[in-house]
Image (cartoon, grey):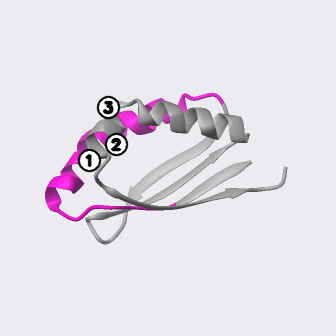
Amino acid sequence: MIRLKGHLICMTEAEAQTVRDHLPEHIRLTRLEPGCLSFDVAQTDDPLIWDVHESFRTRDDFDAHQTRTRESRWFEATRQILRDFRVEDLPD
């Protein structure tokens, strides 16, 4: 299993609004991907920061998610927003 944990960190309210505008569709599409076990993005007490937790069955599933995301409207809209993520390979 592959697990990603971390934060999406906005610098301005405009960036935060971009996340709010695009996040529901990004979550919906990701949860439909083969191998997606969980995908949760939740705003923290700080309105400019989101907690991100995701897990995928295999490294190939995770890599396919990364490829799809890089070609998505989500990434196009949010590419400038800071991401602070850790990716872990967990034993089966």
Mark 3 or 1: in front is: 3
Report the span colored magenta. Answer: 6-34
Q: Position of residue 6 (x, y in %)?
A: 50, 63
The quadrant in which residue 22 appears is top left
On the image, numbered disc 3 is attached to which residue? 73
On the image, numbered disc 2 is attached to which residue? 23
Q: Residues within 10 Å of mark 1 (few under 14, many from 20)?
A: few
Q: Position of residue 43 (x, y in %)?
A: 35, 60
Can you see residue 36?
no
Residue 18 within the segment the image draws in magenta: yes
Q: Is residue 25 above or below residue 5?
A: above
Could you tell which of marks 2 and 3 lies nearer the N-terminus? 2
**Alpha carbon distance from label 3 to label 1:** 13 Å
The quadrant in which residue 81 appears is bottom left
The prevailing secondary structure element of the residues shown in magenta is helix
Q: Amino acid at mark 2?
A: Leu
In-front residue for pair 43/69: 69
Q: Residues within 10 Å of mark 2 (few under 14, many from 20)?
A: some
Q: Position of residue 30 (x, y in %)?
A: 50, 35
Give the SS element for disc 3: helix
Asked if residue 85 lies left or right of residue 9, the reply is right
Q: Amino acid at mark 3?
A: Arg
Q: Which mark is residue 56?
A: none
Q: Amino acid at mark 1?
A: Arg
Mark 2 or 3: in front is: 3
Query: Which residue lies most toward the left here?
Result: 14
Give the SS element for disc 2: helix
Residue 56 within the segment the image draws in magenta: no
Q: Which mark is residue 20?
A: 1
Asked if residue 74 lies left or right of residue 7, the reply is left
CB-based contact (under 8 Å), mark 2 and mark 1: yes
